[in-house]
Image (tube, rainbow, N blue to C red):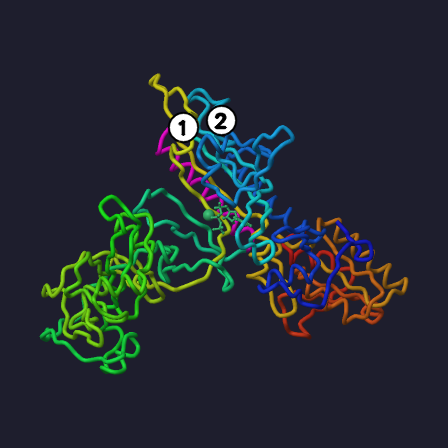
Amino acid sequence: MLQRFTQALIPTVKETPAEATNASHILLMRGGFVRQIGAGIYNFLPLGLRVLRKIENVVRQEMDRAGAQEVLMPALLPGEYFKETGRWDLYGDVLFRIRDRKGGDYHLGPTHEEIITDMVRREVKSYRQLPLNLYQIQTKFRDEPRPRGGIMRGREFTMKDAYSFDVDEAGALKSYENMRDAYRRIFDRLGLTYRIVQADSGAIGGKTSAEFQVLADSGEDAIVACDACDYAANVEAAEIGQTPPGPEFPKEETREVHTPGKGAIADVAKFLKVNAKRFLKSLLYVTPASDAHPQGEVVMACVRGDHEVNEIKLANALGVREVHLATEADIERATGANVGYAGPIGFAGRVLVDPGGAELTNAVTGANKTDYHLMGVNLSRGDYKADVKDIRSASEGDPCPRCAARGESGKFKAYKGIEGGHIFILGTHYSSKMRATFLAQDGSEKPIVMGCYGIGISRLVASAVEQHHDADGIQWPQAIAPYHVHLCTLGTEPEVMQAAKGLCDALVERGIDVLWDDRDERPGVKFKDADLVGLPWRVTIGAKTLARSECELKARSNRDPKGHELLTLADAPEAIAVKLGMGR
Ligand code: ATP
Ligand code: MG
């Protein structure tokens, strides 16, 4: 299709909007793709909507191809369904709650597990009707505590959510893998660089789940990915490969050293002239109150001096919901010393140590005595008692668990990611609560086994920009660019306009979408806007090129100011079509 700039609403602006910090937010505002009307609430202007629709269409095609069927559930939901599963209370302030005129409880849908489970329990009675996969592309509402990054984290946003229904776990796993393959095709087609990331550590309530993380420095999620195989995981969930222990050193006697006023590892390390990697960092955490520990249990977590304790892994290792760092007062009470001098020897409570800390020879630790440390501490000799557990965050350079298990040497690289999609086996969590059952082949009644699969369609618009931009503007991947070609006419003489119109018609005839900047503006203004809006190809026609029956073609990704080629007007349509992979 052809869109003339003079007839379009493309309000580009030079100024960087004050509230915007990340590149996608700035460029989508400056390029006239979206406009904010409230915190986390955005209008999509024509260019933004075209990108959104292109992403939707790729998602729709791949979901259909995977055998899922599209439905549409309401955004306005009676409260009874979330009350049935307890999420009416669990969702807390994130749920947008509404009262109708009769005083009934309603809310806007943040996700639709309950509603689809209700749909299926009404309609599906027999194993013969399973498996089933239903999806929708729809607006979701979440009163996020911190909406940020423009449409990246909105309070109203577009999501594709799919739900699978199977007769058993094996079937659910097959549906899950089918969705994972569909997601791979979607993210590949959208031109995004991503990693499929293990999302939960699995120690507590371990369900199969993975996130599709779009790699970007501005991402909120810290992930590690192997440089040799395709293992990737959230830093919190990543297992760390075990490597054979290093060379044995002779074990020294444990001895107390005076370290006055040196609590921090960096200071003690310098003072004792010992590398921080030889330290056993000992941190105290408190578990939630329980019958056995009405005040919460104070436990010690030890890791090598250059490693970080991971609170999620620690909580999993302890079998508790969460842990909190102990307060200064707790620490002083538990160790009898000031903060900075805790260590496992002589500590009265439970001690957990990470494998990296456990294998230290002649470690340095706090002495549980103000102004004193211990040197020559060895767990292997039984100097202290501890459970050895993986309780630290993975970091760059750590061995990959899969590779290590095969005796190979893949290592982690660290990335930041944006969660673009999430796939999840739900099991019978919702179907049991809502009694969505079916009659099995053996005549018994069983709960349906479910999975759920989300993609943040509007978030992907922003994610694509995070990955594809430079200082001048966006560089849309072809699959989701609002138009394929940005045609700039220089001057408005009838011959120029006529030649441009002829080129447009020939391009449109080949299925190419053209944005024609037909404004009476200086070339500099037009080129700046073309760079900002970021269509893959720019074509320029002016009196000068026309005199030779030519036009200029330049890729948005080509940063060489002279990086254009000259095409005859006769050859241009097919040549451009070939570049787009749309040739005859
Ligand atoms: P996050 O951890 O980023 O808050 P989530 O885990 O709560 O996301 P899901 O419930 O898994 O999100 O939703 C499925 C997908 O919807 C996410 O993978 C993400 O791409 C998208 N999404 C979630 N919240 C938002 C939001 N506030 N704005 C835009 N997209 C969102
Ligand atoms: Mg998620």
Image location of residue 375, percent across then percent down? 16, 75
Where does the magenta region start and end?
A: 167-191
Prevailing SS of the magenta stretch: helix
Residue 493 magenta: no
Circle count: 2
Residue 224 image point, x, y percent: 38, 60
* Residue 227 picture location, percent across and down: 37, 62
**Of helix, strand and loop, which one carries label 1?**
loop
| Residue 465 placement, left or right of 230 | right
Position of residue 497 relative to residue 70, above or below, is below
Q: How far across and down, in percent of the image, does residue 482 sit?
A: 68, 53
- The residue nearer to you, when weighing 382 against 267, is 267
Q: Residue at x 39, y 55 (%)?
A: 234
Q: Secondary structure at mark 2?
A: helix
Q: Which mark is residue 120?
A: 2
Numbered tag placed on residue 195 in the rendering: none
Most foreground residue, 483 or 420 = 420
Q: Does 299 appear above or below 438?
A: below
The residue under the point 75% across, 57% down is 10
User: Quick check: marks 1 and 2 in contact, CB under 8 Å?
Assistant: yes
State whether residue 376 is above or below residue 230: below
Q: Is residue 488 left or right of residue 187?
A: right
Label 2 neighbour load within 10 Å: few <14, some 14-19, many 20+ = some
* Residue matched to label 1: 448
